[in-house]
Amino acid sequence: MRSRLRLGLQQVFVIEAALVGLFFISATRFLIGMIYSRAGGASIVLSLDPSTIPAGIPGAVDASTVSNEIIFLVYMLALPLLALILGRIRWVTIVAVALIAAGRALMVANTSISPIISAGMVFGGSLVYIAMLVRFRAQALPYLFVIGIGADQVFRAVGNTLDPSWSPDYLTTQIVLSVILVVLGIITTIGQGRQQKSEQSEVMPNYGLMPIWGGIGLGGLLFIELALLGLPNTVAGRSGFDYTALAPFITLATLLPLIPWVRQRASNFVGVFDQNARGWLWMLLMALLIVFGTRFQGIIAGIALVIAQFTASLLWWWLVRPHSEKERQFTGLWLVLAVLVFLLLVSADNFTYDYGYVQNMPADLAFLNPYVPPFLRAFRGFGLGVLLLGIFLAALPMVQTRRRIPWTGGTRLASFFGLVLAVGVSVGVAAAVRPPIIQGKRDTPQTPLNSIRIGTYNIHAGFNEFFYFDMDGIARTIQQSGADVVLLQQVETGRLTSFGVDEVLWLARRLGMGARFFPTNEGLQGLAVLSRVEIVDDEGVLLTSSGSQTGLQRVQIRPDEGVITLYNTRLEYLLEASEARSVDQQQQDQQRQLNEIFGLLSTTYSNDKNGRLLVGGTFNNIPDSPIGDQMRSAGFLDPFAGTGLPQELSATLWRTGYPKVQFDYLWLWKRSLVPVGANTVNTNASDHRMAVIETFIKGAQ
């Protein structure tokens, strides 16, 4: 009877840990995006006269508010240090789950409490919970992360990569889950206290501690999971393979280690190798899989990253070890170290994308200018290096553990239920990510199509001018425009700071449009085209870029018996305050990129008098600049020129405190397409307005 009660209690432990894991992973992803958003918004506000900021605009937050939020997060980061003092008091677990439950509910409740404060409560409470879990229920720790990451994948599959549990519509469900978590916390704490009294010794297999290597490994492994392997759309972006095909296999690879039989086979495999070498060999295997999966493209690269996720998911069992009563417990301290390692890796990952926007330090820190800005700019192209550093740190616990292999087996029944769970959830993910059937618009006798609307929209990675993340606003803008085809710039498909969302996939499914994406930076940042007209071909090429890496995307659509070729680009961004390069040097980079574009166009269209061609995107310069003059000299027409529209209505770059100018264009080549209208869409979802033209597709000559 006692054995049955203990087994039942262990199952409740796992359910409780799984709920905490889901809340923790979801809140951590949310926190990364929100810190980036709030810090960006505060920096914009600091640079402006407060009287010029539109009242009520989302994201415009005072710097002191953000500073207070960061201070609160620091306190939450230090919270597990309390476990060094109060760790022997089991009831601390109930306090931790109450903090987690309340914070997670407040994240979606419409209250005056900052979302960073709410998510910080979940984060800090989870760290305390993990410290207590390691101390009293160590065998449940891997389930917290494995099931938590797997459940996060399910939510994102349902939400087309945007977590629906962040929506206010989820509040009722979240309150129910929060109450369940608190009830489970009370049950397990009371039950474990009674179980301990029935034991003859304090030394039990479930009592553990996290060594310093476990803390370092936790930080590295959490980064690898959140930045790449645990997010199917990120795996798809890095490997260049289809998200729909990869998602269920990533989920399966995540959950397979829950099966005791799988863990036993893994134990038998590594047991063949010398105990001093097996950790290094596992690290080498993961590194090779990551290199292959990110440096090659296609199905083989996708398979490599699926296998890498399986090997990473098995590492959660190596973070802790059994602990005897006489040993001192420093788990809380090493959890703080884990978070610091994680934050350093996240920061490094951020600069592999934002290296082009690094500015020199202010006057009081000018002595750092020879060192810090060049160091941060050097992260260009170093995304793989950051991932490999994460792999190295994640595998250190396995390298340092030589006398034991924690991948223990279990009963056949446990393996059966584990297999049913892993396969069942993966099948559910496969159903959730299945793409909708899109019927492209086409000119036919039954449905004549004489003209189409084409737009260009720089979505600023989903953020508005003050870095408020507003994908709903982006989608509404495109709907309001009535565009049949949209050229998108500054698009991201799984970056940590944009909440891990595949913005192209999300917009395409929200709007019922076909989509093509061309990555220009680390596989997750680039250019895209959405279309209600059938897409028949697409490709892209990188352009020479001294600042942020950019490129040229070519997409062909077929509205009738012929095709229209669309070229989508974003030229070098001009930084007026840049200390690294002058504005003249940056304009020279723009000129070089435009010459490369002309070189690519000339081979296809120099002798074609009737080809229908459009070159659009963000040119980051005004119409009467040398860039605009060169486009007109080459025979391109700007449909906004000569329309009689006031400059403010044709402007596409709208930033508070600056003149409103046209930076985004839809250039038509030699009147091969005849424009019949041009306008911009007046919304603030991005710092750019969407430009739209309507053009005849028949009778152009």
Image (spheres, rainbow, N blue to C red):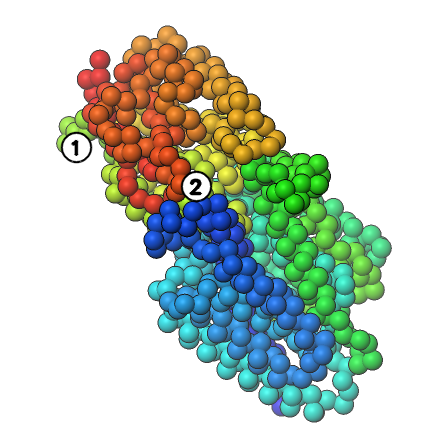
Neighbour class for label 2 at 10 Å: few (<14), some, many (≥20)?
many
In this rendered view, identify the residue nearer to me: 6 or 486: 486
What mark, if any, has residue 279 been given in the picture?
Answer: none
Counting from the top left corner in percent of width and height, residue 122 is at: 54, 68
Q: CA separation, marks 2 and 1? A: 36 Å
- Nearer the N terminus, badge 2 or badge 1? 1
Q: Is mark 2 on a helix, strand or loop?
A: helix
Q: What element carries label 1?
A: loop
In this rendered view, identify the residue nearer to me: 627 or 492: 627
Residue 210 higher or lower than 485, as above or below = below
Neighbour class for label 1 at 10 Å: few (<14), some, many (≥20)?
few
The residue located at (61%, 43%) in the rendering is 362
Quadrant of image for the C terminus: top left
Residue topped by disc 1: 447
In this rendered view, identify the residue nearer to me: 692 or 404: 692
The residue located at (47%, 20%) in the rendering is 594
Residue 531 higher or lower than 308, as above or below = above
Residue 437 higher or lower than 649, as above or below = below
Residue mark closest to the camera, 2 vs 1: 2
Question: Hey, what amino acid is under mark 2?
Answer: His
Quadrant of image for the N terminus: bottom right
Question: Hey, what amino acid is under mark 1?
Answer: Thr
Counting from the top left corner in percent of width and height, residue 186 is at: 55, 84
Counting from the top left corner in percent of width and height, residue 133 is at: 65, 74
Q: Quadrant of residue 615?
A: top left
Q: Are marks 2 and 1 in contact (CB under 8 Å)?
A: no
Residue 627 seen by the camera: yes
Residue topped by disc 2: 460
Counting from the top left corner in percent of width and height, residue 574 is at: 49, 30
Q: Quadrant of residue 134?
A: bottom right
Residue 160 seen by the camera: no
The residue located at (46%, 49%) in the rendering is 45
